[in-house]
Image (cartoon, helix red, strand yellow):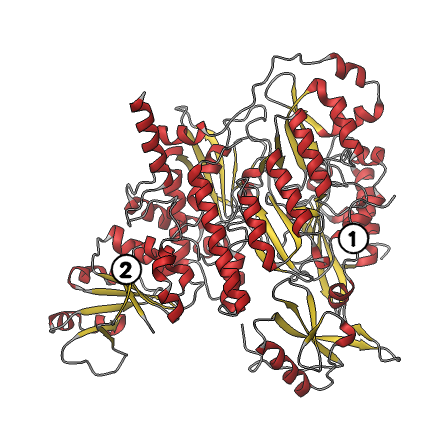
C-alpha cells in the first residue's frame, strides 16, 4: 500500500475520510475531534486538497482502530446536511439497495 | 459423504487456534493491517463495503445436514440470519465481526468445516460436479480425487504464496457441470483404452479481465500420478508466474505468454526431474480415501411409484418435477435441484431458517446429504421418487420450489456494488428486476434453457463471459452501465460470449434483455433450438440490430 | 534483527557482505550471488565459511555446481506474499541434497515459520523480536501435515496407512 504521505491527493469538492472499524468492520467516518463516528453527519468536511491530506494522514495513523481509510466525496445540502457524494458511499452509508429474503409479496 | 478422522479434525482445530492468535495480535496492534491482511485472506476474511465478509469452503459441494445446520447457526449467531452461496461451492456471510470470527470458525470446525484458503494467493477450494456419485453414466465418483486434492492443497508448504489465486475443478461426466474449462487446472476423469482411471489435464482457463478457455496440457495422466503432475504445474507456476502485475499473475497469462507447448515442456521437464517424491497414489492409498466416503443404502424401488403417478395430476407439481428433478443412477431415485432463485430475491441467498429446513428435508428424504452447485442452487442428491410429492410440498412451504432451474430466471450473480468493495455497479437489483420481468413460469418454460450471468465488475465472479447472456457492470462518469454479451457457455463446449454493442444504462438493462429474448423467440428455427444454439447459428448481428435499432 | 537457528535465538556468525564492500580477511561471510559467481573458486578457497545469498528469481542451476562446498545458502523473501523461495528451498534440499545452513532472509514473520521449516529452512533472520521469541511455540502449532516434503514429518496419509496396517495385523 502506498502511504498517503506519498499519494497525490486532489479533491474537486467537499469531501470526508471514511474507513471500516477494525474489530467489527462497521463503516466509520473521521470526525473533526480526531476520532471516528458511525454517523456520516459527524464527519469532518474538508474543502481543499491540503486539508484532505491532513485528515487522511491523521486517520491512517490509527491503524489499530480503522482499516483502509480513504477520501470520498460528499454533497452538502442547504441546511448543512451531509449526503454521500456517490453511489458507493450512498450504499455504505444507507445500506443495501435491494430486497432480501423473504421476498415481500 | 466424506468423514473427517482425528487427523483432519486436529488440523482444522490447529488452524483455528493459529487464527485466533492472529486476530488477537491484530486487535492489540501487534500486527498492522498490512501484515494481517494476507493472514485473514488465507482464512476467507475479506473487507467489503459494510463489514467483513467471511467465505467458508464447501469442498466439492458436499454437505451433511449437520454441517448445513452449523452454517445456519453461524448465519444466525454471528451474522444477520442469511448466507450467500457462490459460484465456487462456497458460502459467504456478509456481516461478521472480526472479533467474533475465531468463535465462528471454532463452531464450524466442530462439524468439519473450514475457511482455509477461500481467498488469498493460494490453492482455493477444490470444486466438482454437484451430481458427483449420483449422475447416471459417470465414470466414477470424482469426489475421491477431489478429497485427495483437497488434502494435498491444504496448507501446502510450497504453494501457499503463489503469484495469484489458483482454482482446480474436477468432473467425471461427459456433461461438464463443474466448468473445468474456466479453471486454472481442469481435470476430466475418464478411463483409457486399458481401462485405467486417469485425467485429461487442462490448464490456463479463467475469466476476469483476460478470459481464456483452458487448454489441454496432457491428454492422459494416470490417476496414480495426478498429485505429482499437479505439483509440477504448480512448481513451474510458482517460479515463473508473473508477480510484477496483479492482472497478469494468473497461470493463464503464463500459459498464454509461453504458449501451451512450451509451458507443457517446462512442466514435463519438472515432472521428470521430480521422480518419486512420495506423491504416487498407490491403489491402497486411493482405497483408503474412498473408504471414508459413505454411500446411502438405497432400497430397491420401482421406476414409477404410485405416489408419482397420482401426483402427476397436479399441474403445479408436474411443472416442478419436469423442471427440478433429474435422473439418478439408481432406479427409483432422483436428484432434486433446489432453486435459490425465487422471483425478486438475491440469487444464491438462503436464510438460516431455510438452511435448517433444507437440512431437515435432507434427513427425511436424502440420506442427510445436500449438494451445492456452481449455479448457486442447492441439491438433494438421493430422493426416492415416491417422496417427490411430499418433498415438493415441503419445499414450497419454505419458498424453495420455484420451478426455474436452468431457465431465464435461474440467474447467476455476484454480490455486486451492494456488498462488494471491488464492484463498479450493482448486480443483484438487475437480477431481481429480470426475475420479475420473466416471473411467468409458462413464458420461462417456452423460452427454455437460458443462462443469464451477471458480474458487477471485470473480475467476473458472476461468470458473465460464459453466460448465454452475460451482463457486466461498468462505471461511466459515476453512473452504472452494463455491457451485454451473448453466446457464452461454461460446459464442455465452453466459450466466451460476444459483446453486442455499447454499454447501456442501469434503467434499460431489463428492457434490452427482453428484446434479446423476444428476438430469439422470433428467430429460433424450432422450439428445441436453445438460445445459445440460435446465437451460434445466427451470430450476434440480428440480436444487436434488435437492441440498438431503436436506441 | 534476531537470528533463529536450530530453533533458538543465536548470534549470527555470518557477516553480510554488500556488493562492492571489502571482504573481511577471515570469518564467515554471506555474499550476494552475482559477486560470488564472479570468482567462485577464489572465494571458496578463503579461510572461513562461505554462504551465498541467492535471489528468488535466479535459476538454481548456476548455484548447483558449488553446493557441496558452500556452508550456507540464504534465500530471499522480498515480501511476505512472494513465495518463490519456498520452491527453491525444497529443490536445494530434496533434489540437490544440500545439507548446509538454509537461511530465510527478508520479510520473515512468525506466520511463515511452519511453511519454511517444512520447505527445509533451518535458519531464520526474523524481522521482529517478538516473532523470534515465539519461534519454538509457533513451530509446534501444527501436528498434522498433508504433504510429504524433505523435512521427514509423517503425512496424515502415511499415519492412516500405518494405523490400517497395525489394525489389520492385530486381527
**Residue B355 pos. (x, y %):** 69, 39
User: To which chain does the residue with label 2 belong?
Assistant: C
Co-location on one chain, circles 2 and 1: no
Disc 2 from disc 1: Cα separation: 54 Å
Q: Mark 1 points at which residue?
A: B429
User: To which chain does the residue with label 1 belong?
Assistant: B
Looking at the rendered structure, the secondary structure element under dot 1 is helix
Camera sees residue B352: yes
**Foreground: disc 2 or disc 1:** 2
Along the horizontal axis of the image, is B420 left or right of A94? left
Circle 2 residues within 10 Å: few <14, some 14–19, many ≥20 = some
Residue at figure coordinates x 59%, y 31% from the top left: B131
Q: Out of B447 and B354, give the one closest to the viewer.
A: B354
Along the horizontal axis of the image, is C89 left or right of B190? left
**Residue B414 pos. (x, y %):** 68, 51
Q: Out of B141 and A44, give the one closest to the viewer.
A: A44
Along the horizontal axis of the image, is B185 left or right of B315? left
Circle 1 residues within 10 Å: few <14, some 14–19, many ≥20 = many
Does residue B137 lie above or below B516 as drawn? above
Does residue C17 lie above or below B189 as drawn? below
Q: Out of B511 and B335, give the one closest to the viewer.
A: B335
Residue C122: give its label.
2
Looking at the rendered structure, the secondary structure element under dot 2 is loop
The quarter in which the N terminus of chain C is drawn is: bottom left
Amino acid at each position: 500500500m502506498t502511504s498517503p504521505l506519498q499519494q497525490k491527493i486532489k479533491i474537486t469538492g467537499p469531501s470526508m475520510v471514511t474507513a471500516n472499524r477494525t474489530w467489527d468492520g462497521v463503516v466509520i467516518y473521521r470526525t473533526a475531534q480526531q476520532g471516528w463516528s458511525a454517523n456520516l453527519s459527524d464527519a469532518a468536511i474538508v474543502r481543499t486538497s491540503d486539508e484532505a491530506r491532513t485528515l487522511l494522514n491523521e486517520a491512517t495513523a490509527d491503524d489499530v482502530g480503522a482499516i483502509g481509510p480513504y477520501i470520498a466525496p460528499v454533497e452538502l445540502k442547504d441546511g448543512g446536511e451531509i449526503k454521500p457524494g456517490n453511489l458507493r458511499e450512498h450504499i455504505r452509508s444507507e445500506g443495501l439497495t435491494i430486497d432480501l429474503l423473504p421476498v415481500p409479496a | 459423504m466424506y468423514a473427517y478422522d482425528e487427523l483432519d479434525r486436529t488440523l482444522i482445530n490447529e488452524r483455528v487456534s493459529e487464527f485466533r492468535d492472529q486476530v488477537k495480535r491484530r486487535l492489540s496492534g501487534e500486527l498492522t493491517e498490512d501484515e494481517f491482511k494476507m493472514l485473514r485472506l488465507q482464512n476467507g476474511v475479506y473487507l467489503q463495503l459494510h463489514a467483513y465478509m467471511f467465505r467458508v469452503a464447501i469442498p466439492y459441494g458436499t454437505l451433511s445436514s449437520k454441517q448445513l445446520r452449523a452454517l445456519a447457526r453461524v448465519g444466525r449467531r454471528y451474522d444477520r440470519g442469511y448466507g450467500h452461496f457462490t459460484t465456487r461451492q462456497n458460502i459467504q456471510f456478509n456481516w461478521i465481526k472480526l472479533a467474533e470470527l475465531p468463535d465462528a470458525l471454532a463452531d464450524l470446525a466442530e462439524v468439519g468445516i473450514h475457511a482455509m484458503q477461500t481467498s488469498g494467493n493460494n490453492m482455493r477450494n477444490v470444486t466438482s460436479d454437484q451430481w458427483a456419485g449420483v449422475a447416471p453414466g459417470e465414470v466414477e465418483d470424482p469426489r475421491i480425487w477431489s478429497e485427495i486434492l483437497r488434502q494435498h492443497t491444504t496448507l501446502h508448504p510450497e504453494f501457499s504464496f503463489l503469484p495469484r489465486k489458483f482454482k482446480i475443478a474436477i468432473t467425471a461426466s461427459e456433461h461438464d457441470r463443474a466448468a473445468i474449462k474456466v479453471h486454472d487446472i481442469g481435470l476430466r476423469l475418464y478411463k483409457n483404452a486399458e481401462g485405467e482411471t486417469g485425467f485429461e489435464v487442462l490448464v490456463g482457463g479463467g475469466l476476469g479481465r483476460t478470459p481464456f478457455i483452458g487448454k489441454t496440457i496432457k491428454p492422459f495422466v494416470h490417476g496414480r500420478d495426478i498429485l505429482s503432475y499437479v505439483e509440477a504445474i504448480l512448481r513451474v507456476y510458482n517460479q515463473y508466474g508473473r508477480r510484477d502485475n496483479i492482472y497478469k499473475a494468473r497461470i493463464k497469462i503464463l500459459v498464454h505468454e509461453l504458449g501451451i507447448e512450451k509451458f507443457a515442456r517446462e512442466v514435463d521437464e519438472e515432472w521428470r526431474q521430480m521422480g518419486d517424491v512420495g506423491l504416487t497414489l498407490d491403489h491402497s492409498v486411493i482405497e483408503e480415501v474412498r473408504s471414508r466416503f459413505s454411500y446411502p443404502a438405497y432400497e430397491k424401488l420401482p421406476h414409477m411409484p404410485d405416489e408419482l403417478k397420482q401426483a402427476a395430476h397436479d399441474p403445479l407439481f408436474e411443472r416442478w418435477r419436469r423442471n427440478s428433478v433429474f435422473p439418478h443412477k439408481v432406479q427409483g431415485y432422483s436428484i432434486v435441484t433446489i432453486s435459490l432463485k425465487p422471483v425478486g430475491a438475491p440469487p444464491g441467498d438462503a436464510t438460516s431458517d431455510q438452511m435448517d429446513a433444507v437440512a431437515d428435508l435432507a434427513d427425511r428424504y436424502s440420506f442427510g446429504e445436500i449438494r451445492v452447485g456452481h449455479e448457486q442452487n442447492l441439491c438433494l442428491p438421493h430422493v426416492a421418487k415416491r417422496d417427490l410429492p411430499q418433498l415438493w410440498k415441503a419445499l414450497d412451504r419454505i419458498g424453495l420450489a420455484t420451478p426455474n432451474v436452468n431457465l431465464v430466471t435461474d440467474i447467476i450473480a455476484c454480490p455486486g456494488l451492494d456488498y462488494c468493495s471491488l464492484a463498479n455497479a450493482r448486480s443483484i437489483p438487475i437480477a431481481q428486476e429480470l426475475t420479475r420481468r420473466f416471473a411467468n413460469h409458462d413464458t420461462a418454460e417456452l423460452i427454455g434453457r437460458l443462462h443469464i450471468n451477471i458480474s458487477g465488475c471485470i473480475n467476473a465472479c458472476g461468470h458473465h463471459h460464459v453466460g448465454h447472456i452475460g451482463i457486466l457492470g461498468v462505471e461511466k462518469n459515476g453512473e452504472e452501465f452494463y455491457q451485454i454479451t451473448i453466446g457464452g457457455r461454461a460446459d464442455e463446449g465452453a466459450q466466451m460470449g460476444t459483446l453486442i454493442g455499447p454499454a447501456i444504462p442501469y434503467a434499460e438493462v431489463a428492457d434490452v434483455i427482453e428484446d434479446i429474448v423476444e428476438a430469439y423467440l422470433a428467430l429460433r428455427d424450432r422450439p428445441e433450438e436453445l438460445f445459445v444454439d440460435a446465437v451460434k447459428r445466427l451470430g450476434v448481428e440480428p440480436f444487436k440490430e434488435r437492441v440498438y435499432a431503436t436506441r | 534483527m534476531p537470528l533463529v537457528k536450530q530453533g533458538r535465538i543465536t548470534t549470527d556468525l555470518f557477516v553480510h557482505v554488500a556488493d562492492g564492500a571489502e571482504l573481511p580477511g577471515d570469518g564467515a561471510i554471506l555474499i550476494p550471488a552475482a559477486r560470488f559467481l564472479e570468482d567462485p573458486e577464489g572465494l571458496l578457497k578463503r579461510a572461513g565459511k562461505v554462504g551465498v545469498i541467492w535471489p528468488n528469481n535466479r535459476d538454481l542451476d548456476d548455484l548447483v555446481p558449488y553446493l557441496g562446498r558452500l556452508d550456507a545458502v540464504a534465500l530471499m523473501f522480498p515480501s511476505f506474499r512472494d513465495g518463490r523461495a519456498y520452491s527453491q528451498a525444497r529443490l536445494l534440499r530434496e533434489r540437490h541434497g544440500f545439507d548446509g545452513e538454509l537461511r530465510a532472509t527478508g520479510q520473515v514473520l512468525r506466520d511463515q515459520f511452519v511453511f519454511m521449516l517444512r520447505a527445509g529452512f533451518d535458519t531464520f533472520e526474523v524481522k521482529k523480536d517478538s516473532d523470534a521469541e515465539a519461534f519454538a511455540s509457533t513451530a509446534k502449532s501444527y501436528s498434522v501435515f498433508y504433504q510429504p516434503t524433505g523435512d521427514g514429518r509423517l503425512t496424515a496419509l502415511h499415519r492412516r496407512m500405518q494405523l490400517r496396517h497395525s489394525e489389520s495385523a492385530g486381527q
